[in-house]
C-alpha cells in the first residue's frame, strides 16, 4: 500500500478498536486498543539518551506486544547506527534500515512516527520536517533551542493533527495532575509561587563524564551534518571530539543546565500549576568553578513572573549536590512541599497559621500519590497510547507545554548572557525586552483595589485571595483641603 493509504488504514483500525473497546467494556470484558497494523517508528540520533532511553524502551515495549515496529535508524555517527541496528535485530529479530541523513530516511521509509534524540540545535528542523511529512513525533527535551523555534513547532504541530510527545518524562508522574486539581479547588488559597531546583556536583565538571572515544573521527562521523552548518544551525568549525560528545557545555549546540536540567523541573511545575508562558523573565549566574573551557555557567537561577500573578523560580549549582532547596508550591493559605528529584509517592501540605487562614482546623498533612516505577517507560507508553487513539491531546507533555517550558528557561539563559530582562507576549507569541510596564500594571491593580488573577482552571472564588479590611483603615486617605477623610 502507499504510505497515506496504510496510515489511513491504521487510523481506521484504531477507531474500530475504540468501538470494540466500548462494547466489550460494557460487558465487563478486557478492553482492546490495538490497531490491525503496527506503528512504524524510525530513530533520529540514537546517541546516549537516544539509545539508552528511546531505543531500549521502545524495544522493550515492542517485545511486550505493543503495536509498534522499529524499522529504521539515522545518525551521523556510524557506531551509533550499527549499535542501534544490532540491538533491534537481536531483540526483535528484524534488522532496521540504516541511514546517515534523517531526511533520506523520511523520504524512503514508510514511517508513521519518529523519535528524535539529537543535540538541541537540530530539534526544531527535524521535528518540523517530520510533522510536515505527516509523522507522529517524540522529541527529547528541550523541544527546541530558541523561543522562535518553539513557537514554530507548536504552530506546525497544531496544523498537523499528529501526536507529539516532548521528552520530559517526569510529566508522566500522576502527582502533577493531582496537585493541579487541588490547587484549582483552592486548597492553598491564591497560588503565589513555585520554586524548584536541579543541583549536581562532579569532580570533573558537568557533562565531561561523557567519554571521548578513539572511534570518534571524521571518518566515522559526518561532522558537517552534525554541525548543521549548511542548514544555518551552527557556524562551521574544525572537528572536535569534545564539541561532538560534550556539546551541552557550548552555546552553539546546547545551553547547559538551562535546557538540560532546568527544563525538567520547570515543565513539571507548569504542569502542576496549570501555568504556561511567562510574562517576564530574568536570569542570573556565572562560571565560578568549572574552568575547563566550557561556555555555559555552573551556577544559575531563572525567575519567571506570570500574568496570573505567580512567580516561578528554578535555581541550581553544578558544584553542590547535598544541599538543594526544597521543591514547593506556595499559596496564601499554605504550601505543598515535594521531595527532590522525580520519585514521589507523597507530598506534604503545610498550612499557614490560623491568624491568616481564620481556620484552626487546618493541619499539616502528608498526601499519598500514585507511584511510577519507570517514568521513561511510562512516558513512551503514553505516547504509544496516544498514537493508537490518534489523539494529540492524550500525551502528558504536548508541544504547547513544551514551548512554554523552553521559553521560560531559554529567556533566562538569554537574560544571563545579554544582561537584559525579557517580556513574552502569549497573544503575539513573541519575546521582547522588558520595560517598567510590568510593575506599573500591578501597582495600578492595587491602586484600583482590584482582584487577584488566578491560575488556569481556578474554581475557588475568592477563597484565600481576598484581604480583610481592618476597621482602622477607615482613617486612611489623603487630607484634601485639610479635611479628615474619616469625617472626624
Image (cartoon, helix red, strand yellow):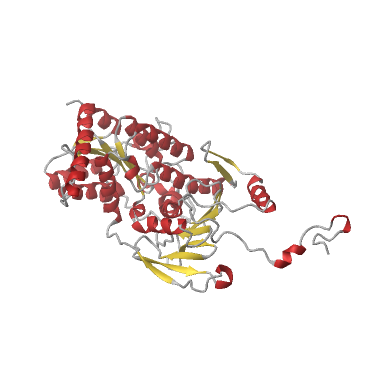
Looking at the picture, tell me which residue is in the foreground, 28 or 354. Answer: 28
Left or right: 400 in relation to 17: right
Residue placed most toward the observer, 417 or 176? 176
Q: Compared to 13, does 444 lie above or below?
A: below
Residue at image position (20%, 31%) is 9
Q: Residue at x 40, y 70 (%)?
A: 366
Q: Residue at x 48, y 37 (%)?
A: 148
User: In the rendering, at what x and y percent does residue 96 appear?
Assistant: 18, 38
Left or right of 201, for residue 214: left
Residue at the far top in the pictured view: 2
Q: Position of residue 335 (x, y in %)?
A: 49, 65
- Quadrant placement of the N terminus: top left
Q: Nearer the viewer, residue 46 or 363?
A: 363
Residue at (40% x, 59% y) in the render: 204
Give x and y (percent) for residue 266.
45, 53
Up-down relation of residue 460 to residue 390 (above or below): below
x, y (%) of residue 210? 33, 53
Q: Residue furthest left?
A: 93
Q: Can you tell which quarter of the image residue 170 is in?
A: bottom left
Residue 109 seen: no
Q: Is residue 364 visible?
A: yes
445 vs 430, left or right, is: right
Name the quadrant of the C terminus: bottom right
Amino acid at each position: 500500500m502507499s504510505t497515506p493509504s496504510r496510515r489511513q488504514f491504521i487510523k481506521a483500525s484504531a477507531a474500530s478498536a475504540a468501538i470494540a473497546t466500548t462494547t466489550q467494556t460494557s460487558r465487563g470484558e478486557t478492553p482492546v486498543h490495538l490497531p490491525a497494523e503496527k506503528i512504524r517508528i524510525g530513530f533520529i540520533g540514537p546517541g546516549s539518551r537516544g539509545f539508552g532511553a528511546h531505543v531500549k524502551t521502545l524495544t522493550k515495549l515492542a517485545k511486550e506486544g505493543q503495536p509498534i515496529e522499529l524499522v529504521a535508524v539515522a545518525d551521523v555517527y556510524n557506531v551509533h547506527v550499527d549499535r542501534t541496528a544490532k540491538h533491534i535485530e537481536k531483540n526483535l529479530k528484524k534488522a532496521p534500515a540504516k541511514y546517515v541523513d534523517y531526511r533520506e530516511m523520511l523520504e524512503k521509509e514508510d514511517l508513521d512516527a519518529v523519535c528524535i534524540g539529537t543535540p538541541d540545535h537540530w530539534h526544531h528542523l527535524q521535528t518540523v520536517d517530520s510533522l510536515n511529512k505527516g509523522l507522529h513525533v517524540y522529541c527529547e527535551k528541550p523541544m527546541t533551542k530558541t523561543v522562535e523555534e518553539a513557537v514554530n513547532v507548536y504552530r506546525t504541530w497544531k496544523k498537523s493533527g499528529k501526536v507529539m510527545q516532548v521528552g520530559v518524562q517526569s510529566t508522566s508522574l500522576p502527582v502533577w495532575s493531582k496537585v493541579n486539581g487541588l490547587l484549582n479547588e483552592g486548597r492553598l488559597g491564591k497560588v503565589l509561587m513555585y520554586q524548584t531546583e536541579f543541583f549536581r556536583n562532579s569532580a570533573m565538571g558537568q557533562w565531561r563524564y561523557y567519554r571521548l572515544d578513539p572511534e570518534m573521527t571524521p571518518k566515522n562521523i559526518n561532522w558537517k551534518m552534525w554541525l548543521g552548518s549548511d542548514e544555518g544551525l551552527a557556524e562551521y568549525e574544525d572537528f572536535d571530539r569534545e564539541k561532538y560528545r560534550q556539546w551541552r557545555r557550548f552555546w552553539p549546540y546546547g545551553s547547559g543546565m538551562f535546557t538540560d536540567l532546568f527544563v525538567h523541573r520547570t515543565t513539571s511545575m507548569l504542569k502542576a500549576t496549570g501555568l504556561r508562558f511567562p510574562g517576564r523573565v530574568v536570569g542570573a549566574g556565572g562560571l565560578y568553578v568549572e574552568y575547563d573551557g566550557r561556555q555555559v555557567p555552573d551556577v544559575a537561577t531563572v525567575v519567571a513572573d506570570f500574568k496570573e500573578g505567580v512567580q516561578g523560580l528554578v535555581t541550581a549549582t553544578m558544584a553542590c549536590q547535598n544541599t538543594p532547596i526544597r521543591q514547593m508550591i506556595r499559596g496564601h493559605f499554605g504550601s505543598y512541599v515535594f521531595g527532590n528529584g522525580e520519585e514521589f509517592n507523597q507530598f506534604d501540605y503545610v498550612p499557614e497559621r490560623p491568624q491568616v487562614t481564620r481556620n484552626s482546623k487546618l493541619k499539616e498533612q502528608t498526601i499519598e500519590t500514585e507511584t511510577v516505577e519507570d517514568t521513561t517507560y511510562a512516558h513512551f507508553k503514553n505516547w504509544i497510547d496516544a498514537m493508537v487513539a490518534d489523539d494529540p491531546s492524550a500525551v502528558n507533555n504536548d508541544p504547547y507545554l513544551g514551548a512554554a517550558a523552553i521559553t521560560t528557561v531559554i529567556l533566562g539563559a538569554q537574560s544571563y548572557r545579554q544582561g537584559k530582562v525579557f517580556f513574552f507576549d502569549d497573544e503575539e507569541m513573541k519575546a521582547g525586552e522588558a520595560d517598567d510596564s510590568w510593575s506599573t500594571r500591578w501597582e495600578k491593580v492595587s491602586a484600583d483595589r482590584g482582584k487577584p488573577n488566578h491560575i488556569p482552571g481556578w474554581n475557588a472564588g475568592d477563597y484565600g485571595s481576598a484581604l480583610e479590611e481592618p476597621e482602622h483603615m477607615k482613617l486612611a486617605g489623603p487630607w484634601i483641603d485639610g479635611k479628615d477623610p474619616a469625617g472626624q
